[in-house]
Image (cartoon, rainbow, N blue to C red):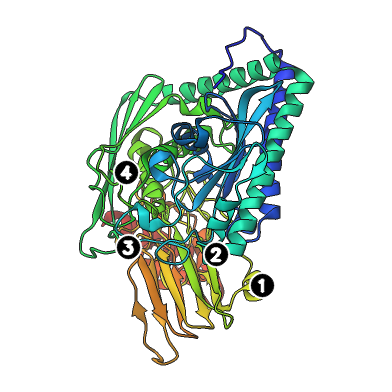
Amino acid sequence: MNLISPTAVTVDPITLQVIRGSFETIAEEMGHVLYRMSFSSIIRESQDLGAGLFDVNFNTLCESESTPMHIGSIPAYLRGIDQTLEDGEWYEGDVVVHNHPYYGSSHTPDLAIVVPVFYQGRLVGFAGNTAHHVDIGAATPGLIIDVPDVFAEGMLFAGTKLYRKGQPNNAMWNYIRRNSRAAGQLVMDIEAQVASARLGAKRFVELLEKYGEDMVFAAADQLMDYAERMTRQRISEIPDGDYTAEGWLDDDGRNRDQRLKVKVTIRVRGDEVEVDLTGSADQTPTAYNVPFEGSTKVAAYAGFRKLLLDAATSDLRVPSNEGSFRPIKVTAPLGSIFNPRAPASAEARFTQCNRMIDLIIRALAPVMPDRVIAGSSASISFAAYSGLRPSGDYWVFLEVNEGAYGGRPRSDGPDSIDNLMANTRNNPLEDLAMHIPMICDRYELRDDMPPGAGEFRGGIGVVKSQRVLTPAFITHESERHHDAPWGIFGGHDGAVGRCTITSPDRPGEEREMYSKFSGLSVAANDVMTYYSPNGGGYGDPLNRPPVKVLEDVLDGFCSVDHARTVYGVAVNLDSETVDMAATEKLRQALRRT
């Protein structure tokens, strides 16, 4: 591999911003092409993808602003490809597919497509993307949880060339077609990824032709240095010290009585920080483990980017590139849930990552009270529905359900929204009915439990009921049926999640489900209902303006009794007003207790 030597070129501020804009536009265009060309709803509608440009040292130069779980993951893929590349060499026209979790991937369903970028006959970088695929031939359709090892996760690709010097590897394409339950969608989605990556490579070359190689890479270096400098500046504002928080995951999808500990220790020293996961649970015998390079480290990067570089709270927008990752070190003992030993399965890795970010926020709350939020749902409801059509072909549908944020320093937690490491969109119900034999019976804000009370209440989760119209299989990956989102600074805890199955054959009977289960066989017209956790509250509920409590009561977010006993607010439903005198007495009494 021909590495580019550092250049002494200094880029003026205006040209630097123009090149920065070009990088970001290329990444966004790559992402746009990918989700517009894809056929499966998880990419086309939910936009579970990431795309960007990288130099030959695998530094991120730019990435699309899509799902945070993909930002920062592709460099680990590139390092894995470097170890496993077919032929051991890159050629113009090559296209590589890669998803091996022990060679850098985030998890197996996230296939990366990488195209080398050649300029004047030399390798100068890469254009790549990742996207979550409907089915890659694993033990259960769509998603997997309770499997013994990585080989049960489906097709494993490590540095595999789909095209070599521009010529298709037809044997590999046929292998892919014949090893997926949703082969048509899989192949077309991969083709969309190839088109996106090739476009990125083309745009990269056009940028080099316009400004020159030295100028473009000098600008890239300056932008990475800027992102690093800004991240270090934000870290240095945190007092030096060790900060710890811990929580518990429900189970591993098989051993139902064994809670799994997640312990996070944040070590701040000057302008650097370490995220140490020592003390977290040992790796599990199921797929409920986290690939270290492609997911654990990426989650830590995402957590600190949210805390320190949030666009809404920062004066300057810091680009998403390698520089922002440099001051952050991640440690997880080999053999733990966050750094499993091969060949342990590691597909169902998302809820652990989200909980890690939730605990990073909790650990730093005492020294960053104006930046942190209360506990979020910090989970994911990832459901795979599947069945057979009359033709004998499989239908497979992947669904990501919303959660809720915790209360914030100046406002309530947002309701019914992906949070922390997730940012996928919901799938339109009309699209579902057009393509899949399913009907949504109910989809609304959760109304069975109030959110965490506080001066700023927690967000409200979603409740969704999906009815299958044919005999089907369901695999569901979720969390937080036992450990409620935490309240902070006097705020109350939120509400745990739930999942039920009902059947027309057993009217009035609800089957309570574990937070995660694999390959459950259900009959036609059976319904799965998911209740996502409600967020925790921020600040003392007695400081919440009474008019806000009244609005919550009128909106159905809390009851009159809850308003009285928790918020100390006397609501008159008939007149839709607050009795201010009675409220003052209630709050005085509650403050004394």
Distance of label 1 from label 2 (alpha carbons): 32 Å
Above or below, 120 relative to 420:
above
Viewer-nearest residue: 173 or 382: 173
Instruction: Give the mark nearer the N terminus: 4 vs 3.
Output: 3
Earlier sequence position, callout 4 versus callout 1: 4
- Image coords of residue 169 (percent x, y): 60, 47
Q: Position of residue 69 (x, y in %)?
A: 49, 45
Q: Residue at x 62, y 63 (%)?
A: 184
In the image, is 403 to the left or to the right of 279?
Answer: right
Q: Secondary structure at mark 3?
A: loop
Q: CA distance from mark 1 to mark 3?
A: 32 Å
Cα gap from disc 2 to disc 3, whole angstroms: 44 Å
The residue at which mark 1 appears reads as: 430
Query: Which-is-in-front pick, marks 1 and 3?
Result: 3
Look at discs 4 and 3 and give the one toward the viewer: 3
Between marks 4 and 2 in the image, the one whose residue lies nearer the viewer: 4
SS type, badge 1: helix
Q: Is residue 94 in sight in this rendering?
A: yes
Label 3 sits on residue: 146
Q: Disc 4 to disc 3, how far (Cα)?
A: 17 Å
Q: Residue 25 at what x, y percent from top left?
A: 71, 35
Q: Amino acid at mark 2?
A: Glu
Instruction: Say which element carries label 4.
Output: loop
Task: Find disc 2 in the rendering and name its residue.
Answer: 551
- The crowding category of the residue bearing disc 2, from other C-alpha atoms within 10 Å (few below 14, some 14 to 19, many at least 20), is some
In which quadrant will I find the N terminus? top right
